[in-house]
Amino acid sequence: MTYKSTRLDRFVSQNSSYKLSDIQLLLAQKRIRVDGQAADSIQQKVSKFTHVMLDDHCLQNNQPLYIILNKPKGVVSATKDPEHTTVLDLIDHPLKHELHIAGRLDFNSTGLVLLTNDGAWSRKISLPATKLSKTYEVTLSKAVTGEYAKVFLQGIYFAYEDITTQPAQLEILSPYQARISLVEGKYHQVKRMFGYFQNEVLSLHRISVGDITLDGLAVGEWRVLGGSE
């Protein structure tokens, strides 16, 4: 989801009774305030979360919203679905209609899902260049060996996209369970990486994205992220 920024003069004229030709005078009279400060240029950029005041009238005061959800199995990572429960159906917030998903999970996968109305934030955490680690716990049909960790660290070639995955960290928890951390999110990436060894992923559970974890959040529960998160 994107939100294009616009010039201050265009924004004010579109959201008030003033014409474009009037805006320069309004600025000179210090009648327009942007994020609490008197505006000084008609070319100032107004984005989705810019606070704009004209005299005592608020033209825009959108607030960013960041939500974490512990997704149950059988819930769709979508905002609308005619047949299944969606992650948005589990959230009770007055601004839920503004949210989009920052990193989906498959229908039968579980765990941490992030939702936001801030497109720049969701793009940032999704880009491999950000190097933000996403960690998953998986249960497998066959035993995992140390060879997996070596191959995951080297990267696995995906012929369909003609790319090699970036290095991923693997920790063996038990013969049939492992924890994997990676910084990208290709289509069905975790399942395809284990598929390199013909080892089927029976369950996949995302436990963290960067420093954001599911600690204290029961299955199906959600909460607004705190400022530090």
Image (tube, grey):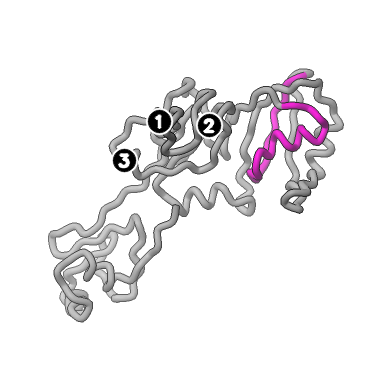
Which residue, given by chain and number where applicable, does mark 1 sit on?
A: 223
Query: Horizontal placement of 112 versus 192: left or right?
Result: left
The residue at which mark 3 appears reads as 95
Q: Is residue 4 above or below residue 80?
A: below
Marking on residue 112: 2
Residue at figure coordinates x 59%, y 51% from the top left: 127
Tell me which label, 3 or 1, sits earlier in the chain.
3
Query: Which of these two is toward me, 208 or 70?
Result: 70
Query: Residue at (16%, 72%) from the top-left corner?
Result: 18
Between disc 3 and disc 1, the foreground one is 3
User: SS of the residue at dot 3?
Assistant: loop
Which residue appears farthest toward the right when viewing the image?
147
Which residue: 68% across, 36% down? 181
- Give residue 16's position: percent from left, percent from top: 17, 66
| Residue furthest front in the image | 82
Classify mark 1: residues with Cα within 10 Å, few (<14), some (14-19) or many (20+).
some
Kind of residue indicated by mark 2: Leu
Q: How far apart are marks 3 and 1 (CA)?
A: 13 Å
**Residue at 21% across / 75% down in the picture?**
27
Q: Give the range drawn in magenta.
A: 176-200
The percent position of residue 133, horizontal first and vertical second, equals 63, 41
